[in-house]
Each structure stands twice: as structure tokens, then as C-alpha cells.
Amino acid sequence: MKLHKVTFVLLIIGGLNWGLEAFGWGVGQFLGESLSLIVYLLIGLSAIYEIFSHKKLCRNCAPQGV
């Protein structure tokens, strides 16, 4: 469950970063090349994790018992 929260936060950061990129303020340009690569890799892995686990972990998306 903690991993779900961490990946959710990373996806929010990634989404905000894409929004900032539209105005030329992306986080990647303020971090070093190696650090930004690590951050982007973690956000990408978080997205993959959420694709496969979100439906069963999210109480709004999980199938409701009948």
C-alpha cells in the first residue's frame, strides 16, 4: 500500500512537470542530467506500476461487492 502512495505522488509530480514544460519551466532543466534521468525513470516505472495495480488498490476503481 505504501508503494501505491509513493507511485501516486511521483505521477502527480510528473504530471505537474509536463504542465510546467508548456511554460518552459520543466524540472529537468534545473537538475543535473543524471539526477533528472533518475527522476524520469522513477516516474515512468511508477506509471507502469499504476497501470497494473491501480484498479485493485483504488477504492473508487475496485469492483464493488454485490
Image: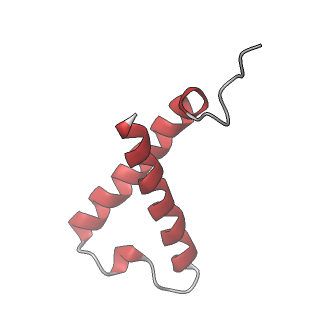
Asked whether, in this view, residue 5 is left or right of residue 16, the answer is left
Q: Residue at x 36, y 39 (%)?
A: 2
Asked whether, in this view, residue 42 is left or right of residue 11, the answer is left
Q: Residue at x 72, y 22 (%)?
A: 64
Q: Residue at x 57, y 74 (%)?
A: 19
Asked whether, in this view, residue 65 is left or right of residue 16, the answer is right
Quadrant of the rendered image containing residue 38: bottom left
The residue closer to the viewer here, 34 or 11, is 11
Q: Residue at x 77, y 13 (%)?
A: 66
Residue 50 image offset from top left, x and y in percent: 51, 38
Residue 21 image offset from top left, x and y in percent: 52, 78
The residue closer to the viewer here, 52 or 38, is 52
The answer to whether residue 39 is above or below residue 49 is: below
Quadrant of the rendered image containing residue 4: top left
Which residue appears farthest toward the right when viewing the image? 66
Quadrant of the rendered image containing residue 15: bottom right
